[in-house]
Amino acid sequence: MRMKAVILAAGYATRLYPLTKNFPKPLLEVGGQTILDHLVDQLREIPEIDHAHLVTNHRFVGHLQDWLAAMGTKAKREDRAHRGLRITIHDDGTTSSDDRLGAISDLRYTIGAADIDDDIFVCASDNILQWSIHDMIKTWKRNGEFHICVRHETDVEDLKKRGNATLDDDDRLVDFIEKPEVPKSNWVVPPLYIYPEASLPLIDDYLEEGAGTPGITGDSPGMIVEWLYTRIPVYAHRIEGTILDIGNPESLEQARRMFGE
């Protein structure tokens, strides 16, 4: 069973300005390597994933291409291969936060540009995952349905900032709301998803319906989950570990402290 990965890296990280005004957030260093390196190190260890497609914007595409070239140079210098993982970078053509496509539109763009017709692991590029992505893949393989991941959270203010999931006894999603004023559960939904191949046409349906429906948008990767779970089965993988979400200067500094910097 082969799977592709799509890494969403086309945002402009305005909350980290001026640090990210002319530099992509995924290439900021934490713990002696870039945020993106932390993710790619995990993807390399997943045998099901044979190709990662990273979508970025026109402003930062050169930085990401240089990062990829440096990765190849380092591998050759150390006389080692990339352990089977190919990486392709895609430029969505946008130049600022004013004309950005949004996460779901970028996903659709990448699927079309790369002609992907496989199952897809989709993730944001600005999180350091202190748990195994491979465990999520193993959970997904039990039934092959659309999967999210969930993390238990007791901080009500944090719950209000993220997708909020309610699960049944089989970990099937029965309710979901993005950034609720009143959370219904303690399960938050980080930006990692598995789209089975059969679900890919629904991305077009979602965006086309959203063009004339208030509240439906392609900007946040979690918004489509709120729409999807009423149409197809959506299941959850329960995370055992933490996620370092690098969203502002404070969280970046906190992550660096955790790595002893």
Image (cartoon, grey):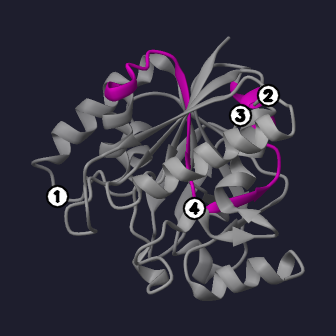
Q: Residue furthest top?
A: 1
Q: CA distance from mark 2 to mark 4?
A: 23 Å
Q: Which residue is mark 3?
A: 170
Tell me, yes or no, if residue 237 can be seen here: no
Question: Quick check: is 136 in the magenta stretch?
Answer: yes
Q: Which residues are magenta?
A: 112-140
The location of residue 130, given as percent across then percent down, is 82, 57
Residues marked 4 and 3 touching at CB (< 8 Å)? no
Disc 4/disc 3 C-alpha distance (Å): 35 Å
Residue at 41% across, 74% down: 22
Q: CA distance from mark 2 to mark 1?
A: 48 Å
Q: Nearer the viewer, mark 3 or mark 2?
A: 2
Horizontally, residue 28 falls left or right of residue 242, namely left
Q: Judge depth for marks 1 and 4 and give the one in front.
A: 4
Which amino acid is tagged 2?
Ala
Residue 139 in the image, given as x and y percentages of width and height:
75, 30
Q: Secondary structure at mark 3?
A: loop
Q: Which residue corresponds to the image point at 41% horizontal and 59% vertical from the top-left?
A: 60
Mark 1 residue element = loop
Amino acid type indicated by mark 1: Pro
- Residue 62 drawn at (x, y percent): 43, 54
Q: Secondary structure at mark 2?
A: loop
Q: Which residue is mark 2?
A: 81
Q: Which residue is mark 1?
A: 214
